[in-house]
Image (cartoon, rainbow, N blue to C red):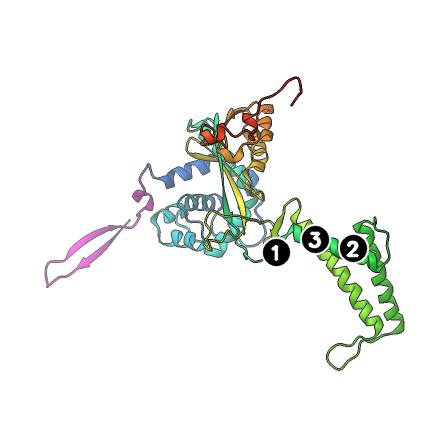
């Protein structure tokens, strides 16, 4: 279909220009473009399980699930993770119009809802992506290269809760109540808490029976019952607060009040240059053939404790293919060596003393265990 346009310039003879109206954006995208590669990969994936979780109620979405996934994956591969940037990509980029296929560009709120819906399916999508790479011969997973980096959490830096501080205050409060309530010194924390709750309930019932009117502010004198009620209420709430803190921490030594999953870690990029700990996550990645084949977020600041749970996830998906594990010195420990040996994996881990073991100072240091001689007769 064409459209005819007549141009009359300085009374010259009319000219007709033929403009094509069936223009396709795909003609501007090279055949070897990454955007076409992303489309082919997504179309090879089995998305039935993921699509089945999409809510069917409400109005019909402007963009279907497959096209939406293509846009999100391509934008993230280009470093566009912000919802606003993805919205601009769909609106103004030729590649965005190619992925949309003539449909209306989604706004940033729609993109945000879609990405939140993908959170529970990212592990399965990554696994399918790796399987496609294996089928095409790009990776074989024989050797995995594992490393981690600390990413600061989107959380307030001054909302820290420390395990040692909580346990210290909890212990001091327990000792104080043991003396005030004349309880045995070997009483457990639960027994002390139960006694405090019982005292609080008794004084609350007393105040209710006597119909005591609680007063506050300057010029009002509190009764002895009101003061006792407020005292035991405060002690009870303190015990409950300490218990909630320890429950949120789990096995960790700290957590953030505004992001309970974040742990305070020492970051490489210290803008304050004072060694201050910040709420962060230890992100572990495994690569093979220059492709990221595994990702895990950990709450442990030390890489020693991340190798085993990370490999458990990878072995569950690709156990038959993985043979060699290559890491840096941060993963070296006897426990990790023993774990890799049990799994039949060959360890290529850089020793922590690789740079210093051949120096004269280290060789002559008799306090180091590698320089000690074993005396079989004395077993020492």
Give percent across and percent down for residue 330.
Answer: 51, 36
- Quadrant position of residue 99: top left
Q: Secondary structure at mark 3?
A: helix
Is residue 349 visible to us here? no
Q: Sequence-wise, which precedes: disc 1 or disc 3?
A: 3
Q: Residues within 10 Å of mark 1 (few under 14, many from 20)?
A: some
Give percent across and percent down for residue 211.
Answer: 87, 74
Q: Is residue 349 above or below residue 58?
A: above
Location of mark 1 (residue): 257
Location of mark 2 (residue): 175
Q: Secondary structure at mark 1?
A: loop
Q: Sequence-wise, which precedes: disc 3 or disc 2?
A: 3
Q: Residue at x 82, y 56 (%)?
A: 178
Q: Residues within 10 Å of mark 2 (few under 14, many from 20)?
A: some
Identify the magenta region: 4-30
Label 3 vs label 2: CA separation? 11 Å
Is residue 222 visible to us here? yes
Name the mark on residue 168.
3
Q: Residue at x 53, y 43 (%)?
A: 282
Question: So how many labels did they put on this image?
Answer: 3
Split into 4 quadrants, where in the image is the C terminus? top right
Q: Is residue 235 above or below residue 117?
A: below
């Amino acid at each position: 279909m064409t459209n005819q346009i007549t141009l009359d310039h300085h009374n010259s003879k009319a000219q007709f220009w033929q403009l094509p109206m069936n223009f396709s954006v795909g003609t501007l995208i090279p055949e070897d473009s990454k955007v076409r590669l992303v489309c082919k990969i997504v179309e090879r994936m089995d998305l039935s399980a993921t699509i089945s979780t999409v809510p069917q109620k409400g109005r019909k979405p402007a963009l279907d699930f497959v096209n939406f996934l293509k846009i999100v994956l391509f934008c993230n591969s280009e470093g566009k993770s912000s919802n606003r940037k993805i919205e601009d990509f769909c609106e103004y980029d030729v590649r965005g119009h190619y992925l949309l296929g003539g449909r209306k560009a989604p706004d940033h709120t729609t993109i945000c809802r879609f990405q939140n819906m993908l959170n529970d399916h990212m592990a399965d999508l990554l696994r399918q992506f790796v399987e496609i790479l294996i089928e095409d011969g790009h990776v074989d997973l024989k050797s995995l290269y594992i490393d981690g980096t600390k990413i600061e959490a989107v959380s307030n830096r001054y909302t820290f809760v420390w395990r040692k501080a909580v346990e210290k205050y909890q212990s001091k409060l327990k000792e104080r109540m043991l003396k005030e309530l004349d309880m045995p010194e070997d009483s457990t924390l639960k027994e002390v808490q139960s006694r405090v709750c019982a005292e609080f309930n008794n004084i609350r019932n007393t105040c209710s029976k006597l119909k005591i009117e609680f007063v506050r502010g300057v010029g009002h004198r509190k009764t002895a019952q009101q003061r006792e009620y407020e005292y035991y209420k405060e002690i009870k709430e303190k015990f409950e607060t300490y218990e909630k803190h320890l429950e949120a921490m789990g096995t960790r030594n700290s957590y953030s009040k505004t992001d309970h999953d974040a742990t305070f870690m020492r970051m490489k990029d210290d803008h304050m240059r004072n060694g201050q700990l910040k709420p962060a996550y230890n992100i572990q990645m495994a690569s093979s053939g220059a492709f990221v084949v595994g990702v895990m977020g950990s709450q442990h600041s030390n890489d020693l404790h991340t190798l085993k749970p990370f490999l458990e996830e990878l072995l569950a998906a690709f156990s038959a293919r993985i043979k060699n594990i290559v890491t840096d010195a941060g993963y070296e420990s006897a426990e990790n060596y023993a774990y890799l040996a049990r799994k039949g994996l060959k360890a290529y881990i850089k020793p922590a003393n690789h740079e210093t073991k051949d120096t004269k100072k280290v060789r002559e240091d008799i306090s180091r265990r590698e320089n000690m001689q074993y005396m079989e007769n004395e077993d020492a």
